[in-house]
Image (cartoon, rainbow, N blue to C red):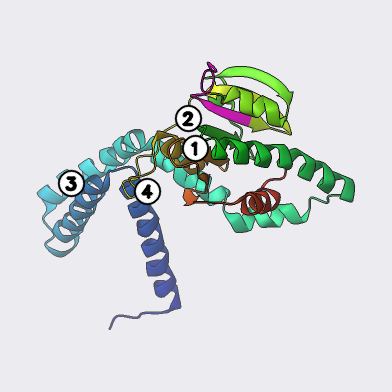
Amino acid sequence: MFDFGIKDFIDIFLVAVILYYIYRLMKESRSLNVFIGIMVFILLWLFVSGILEMRLLGSIMDKLVSVGALTLIILFQDEIRKFLYNLGAHQRIKSLTRLFRSGSKKEAEADKATIMPIVMACMNMARKKVGALIVLERDSPLDDIIQTGDVIDANINQRLIENIFFKNSPLHDGAMVIRRKRICAAGCILPVSHTVDIPKELGLRHRAALGISQESDALAIVCSEETGRISVAMRGEFQLRLSAEQLESLLSKEILL
């Protein structure tokens, strides 16, 4: 008689969770058909080896599985890296680390004084329908992104932000990266998200913002050149049509500059 205990339930539950996260990663990277094919092959392998007990065919499939595991790691190294990064950058884990970071009243006021020029610049650019893409680095370093642009290393200033994204500026097409209360670089190239369910009215800037938020814990602010609306990409999701108060509240809550 088959003995089913709590350990077996936990085992099945953990396997289901792992398969669900793998399914999400494959769907986002447009590799869902590959994932389905792998699952069909694994089920066929278990059926041939465990139930039918076909030794020759089973041994051949065993070899394919052992070699295929290494092949999958090579093919899907970006997806695997993203999965491990998301696991380590989980919001609850980061919340625990923030408990040990004590901030004084002066530090809070300094952070607010740093955030307000960003908010005011975004509101002015949105009102004038000037396209802009601002990335705020958090725990995950963006050195590879910074290297694609021009290093500025300047204090955060509302006029400087607006001048960089002025339509005739040579740096207005790229992204600005802010690191540790300073404008680090501008004209940077971001990875573009391949998520298929992005609303059609959102353009390439929004896809780039979503892409960097999927590959890191950075927060990306987008000012739409077409609609004049402000959006924020964070943890692979959008918050659209933000007002100045909403943007300030979000930055104050999420960013420890």
Q: What residue type is labelled 3?
A: Met
Q: Residue 161 carries which label?
A: none
Residue assigned mark 1: 212
Query: Image point 73% across, 53% down: which residue?
Result: 98
Q: Residues within 10 Å of mark 1 (few under 14, many from 20)?
A: many
Of badges 1 and 3, nearer the viewer stands 1
Between the C-alphas of marks 1 and 3, the distance is 39 Å
Magenta highlight: main SS: loop
| The N terminus, quarter of image | bottom left
Quick check: 127 above or below 43?
Answer: above
Q: Which of marks 1 and 2 is nearer the N terminus?
A: 2
| The C terminus, quarter of image | top right
Q: Which mark is residue 61?
A: 3
Of badges 1 and 4, nearer the viewer stands 1
Q: What residue type is labelled 1?
A: Ile
Whether residue 169 is in magenta: the answer is yes
Q: Which of marks 2 and 4 is nearer the N terminus?
A: 4
Cβ atoms under marks 2 and 4 closer than 8 Å: no
Q: Earlier in the sequence, mark 1 or mark 3?
A: 3
Of badges 2 and 4, nearer the viewer stands 2
Q: Residue 25 carries which label?
A: 4
> Which is nearer the eye, 198 or 73?
198
Which residues, given as a range, are shown in magenta? 167-177
Residue assigned mark 2: 190
Between the C-alphas of marks 1 and 4, the distance is 15 Å
Res. 257 in view: no
Helix, strand or loop for disc 2: loop
Cβ atoms under marks 1 and 3 closer than 8 Å: no
Quick check: 234 above or below 117?
Answer: below
Res. 123 in view: yes
Q: What residue type is labelled 4?
A: Leu
Helix, strand or loop for disc 1: helix
